Amino acid sequence: MLNVYAKCGETNKMMEILNYSQRQEKFISIDEVTCTTIMSGFLKANKVKEMFDFYDNQIPKLALNNNINLQSKFIINLKSVGHLKIMEILDENEIEKLSFHHQQFLDIFQNELYPDIKFKPTSISLNDVNTLIEVYVLLNKKSWMKAVNDVETILSQKSNCIHSLKNRPC
């Protein structure tokens, strides 16, 4: 039922079910799948701030009584998607906010999704390459062509990234 409400963006009903399941007399154990379902529901409803609130404040509390893998790639990926969504909403003149969310995305990408990339060649999914390009384009909303050099540097010249776009002729 939680999944249905999440897919419909019914965040209030989604949270009611979660809260009910965590009551002592009705306790139902949850895991990272439940957390990603809820985070996805917030994103589906365009409630990005609520998604970050759930991640930062509620998941740590839920993890005390449940078996939640806080290092789940799905949870980490949804955090990065949250920063991407905020960047999509921001105006091109909100440079400080764009830069902040861009840096947050890069920190998640380099430190949580692909932590080995700093030390050794690391395979990156085409989907993540696409998202990385999108983040750089969003950072440079006024003139997206400025993103080309950054993307080129990250994906080819000075990088341990291994991806399907590397070394392919145009």
Image (cartoon, rainbow, N blue to C red):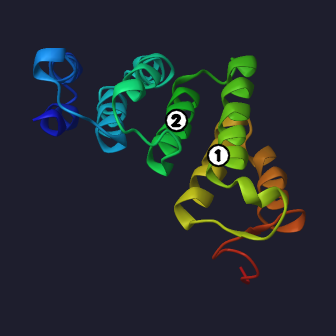
Q: Is residue 68 visible?
A: yes
Rendered image: mark on residue 95: none
The residue wearing badge 1 is 112
Distance of label 2 from label 1 (alpha carbons): 10 Å
**In the image, is 58 to the left or to the right of 148?**
left
Residue in the picture at 47% in, 16% down = 57
Circle 2 packing at 10 Å, graded few (<14), some (14-19), many (20+), is: many
What x and y, as percent, mark residue 130? 58, 57
Whether tag 2 and tag 1 are in contact, CB under 8 A, the answer is: yes
For image coordinates 90% across by 62% down, the residue present is: 158
Instruction: State the residue in front, 97 or 112.
Output: 112
Residue found farthest to the right: 158
| Quadrant including the C terminus | bottom right
Tell me if residue 137 can be seen: no
Amino acid type assigned to the residue bearing label 1 in the image: Glu
State the residue in front, 144 or 8: 8
Q: Quadrant of residue 100?
A: top right
Q: Up-down: is 16 above or below 43?
A: above
Name which quarter of the figure residue 105 lies in: top right
Q: Quadrant of the N terminus?
A: top left
Name the residue beneath numbered marker 2: 79
Q: Position of residue 162 (x, y in %)?
A: 71, 72
| Dot 2 amino acid type | Lys
- 40 displayed left or right of 3: right
Crowd rating for badge 1 (residues with CA inside 10 Å; few <14, some 14–19, many 20+): some
Q: Secondary structure at mark 1?
A: helix
Residue 136 placed where, x, y %?
Answer: 70, 44
Q: Earlier in the sequence, mark 2 or mark 1?
A: 2
Which one is in front in this view, the residue at disc 2 or the one at disc 1? 1
Count of numbered marks? 2
